[in-house]
Amino acid sequence: MSQEKKIKLTINNKPVEVEEGTTILQAAEKLDIKIPTLCYHPLLEPYAACRICMVEAKTADTSELVTSCNTKVQEGMIIETESPRALKARKLNVEMIMARAPAAEKVQEIAKELGIERTRFEITDPEEKCILCGLCVRTCEQIVGANAISFTERGKERKVYTPFGQPSEACIGCTACAFFCPTEAITVEDLRGRQVIHEELNLGPSTAIRVPTRQAVPMVPFIDEEACIHFKTGECKICEKVCEKEAINYEMEDEEMEVEVGSVILASGFKSFDPKRIPAYGYGRFNNVITALEFEKLVNASSPTEGKILMANGEEPKSVGIVHCVGSRDENYNEYCSRVCCMYSLKFAHLIKEKTEADIYDFYIDMRCFGKGYEEFYHRLLEEGTKFIRGRVSEVTDIPLTEQEEGKLIIRVEDTLLGAIRRIPVDMVILATGLEPGMDQNEIARTFNISCSQDTFFLERHPKLAPVSTFSDGIFLAGTCQSPKDIPDTVAQAGAAASEALALADKGTFELEPITAEIDEELCSGCQICVGLCPFTAITYNKEKEISEINDALCKGCGTCVSACPCGASQQKHFRDAQIFAEIEGIFIE
């Protein structure tokens, strides 16, 4: 295996040995020697547009000024980064850039380091930040592959713009140009003027490759195909270039695996109620009407706001309304109680009080604080000054009736304790959305031959005696797929389900139902009516014998096949017709 050739040189009287092909700038970084530059980025081929990185390079024959970002090192080269010649050229270039982009803070910082107070050249636009380094253009062309921006005009009129100065259809909104821009001349703004977009907050980096949250288990990153530039244009692949472990694989696809197991624990979870189904609450129409999950992301320390509670305009709210039971305890949507809304709403009220000085209004139907320490927490909120209003909110509007309501969101509610309709103006509304069964709940139920209750949650075998078991042996339930519940109850049920599964695996066998159906082969006509009716798929059709057969291990003795059999071939063990007639006759015997 051949080794890379090493080059020895000296930078500011410090010897260093680097690989052949290394630039002077990279060699200086190895010695922690800082050479200022504006147009250099390690992910792009350097081309020395700003020329601030000028250094004096001496070889055996010559001494010349070179740009360090794209000049390769040579054996025995002597580099001086702050020689009088290098500093003079650097200051001249900085002054010209200052005249071009006087508003660029990065340029001002470099000028200050070089002792430059103002430029001697004419300033044409005091608000200009673009230094025409071309990083954005090259990024859009070489990395993104969109070619949405380019240089236009010439001389003093030269600038970076879209073709013909019109919004470009080639732009995919990746914001790579803004990311690479060294002077923040390119900014990304929301079309609706929002500083904080609550529905798009991520608990972690808002990048195409990221971990789901800072606390994700396992802590494994994933590539968001909808946001990844490579999957949009076929270009980029920066993550593949910088990954030392070569872990990036763009060709990887989802795989389906078949695993033979002895028991299954279903923990398919829940989905949050979509508040857009209640148009009166204004979610999706008003920027500052947000869901509980969006607020949870907003207040988390890992959020883009670093846990600060901010409205869409970037300001802190002075009043907040929390609406309970959105989608729960409602005949129009879900009649059941979601159990968690009251307590997480109280938590939100406490966090708002802790982080801001906002007035908090808590709109509830009934306060259901059922857990250990929950009632005490409710009384703590009362002492902290949270205003609790009993009554279901009818609507959230932005139409003011008084001067006090101008510029506010108005929550209209019937206060059942006062017996009056009230209008409460607030800056932000948090909708405490309820829990609903997962989207694939019915499909999962069919796959595992289990039942669902009226509200589509999985049905347990017995609510008290077998809360984690189902009517199918070896299938157990854990968490909110069975019913809405909070974290402590979910953890407890998950432990119980795991114990049941382990007990079954350790035992190695399970007891069959004593009362099952059986088919008399002589009477069976092979009509297969029972095959389609069996809810446990315990009946199959034997083509060779042309009769139906029952698997005793799957049969639960429900009797559906017995009642449907037109020829009486299917009978229930211990409940055959002859046995029942005998019992009836026995009643009349004295």
Image (cartoon, rainbow, N blue to C red):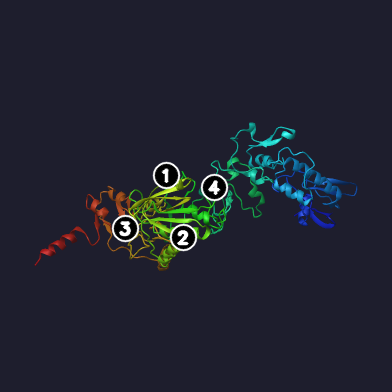
Tell which tag, 4 or 2, sits nearer the viewer.
Answer: 4
Q: Compute the Cα span from label 4 to label 3.
A: 62 Å
Mark sitting on residue 555: 3
Q: Bin the neighbour count of mark 2 within 10 Å (Cα to Cα): few under 14, some 14-19, many 20 and up.
A: some
In the rendered structure, which amino acid carries the disc numbered 3? Cys
Tell which tag, 3 or 1, sits nearer the viewer.
Answer: 1
Residue 10 horizontal/vertical position (percent): 84, 55
Q: Compute the Cα span from label 1 to label 2.
A: 32 Å
Label 2 sits on a secondary structure element that is helix
Q: Could you tell me which quadrant the C terminus lies in?
A: bottom left
In the rendered structure, which amino acid carries the disc numbered 2? Lys
Left or right: residue 348 versus residue 454 is right
Mark sitting on residue 401: 1
Residue of label 4 = 313
Residue of label 2 = 347
In the rendered structure, which amino acid carries the disc numbered 1? Leu
Mark nearer the N terminus (3 vs 2): 2
Q: Are marks 3 and 1 in contact (CB under 8 Å)?
A: no
Label 4 sits on a secondary structure element that is loop
Q: Are marks 3 and 2 in contact (CB under 8 Å)?
A: no
Residue 356 horizontal/vertical position (percent): 52, 57
Q: Residue farthest to the right?
A: 61
Q: Compute the Cα span from label 4 to label 2.
A: 24 Å
State the residue at coordinates (85%, 57%).
13
Q: Compute the Cα span from label 1 to label 4.
A: 23 Å
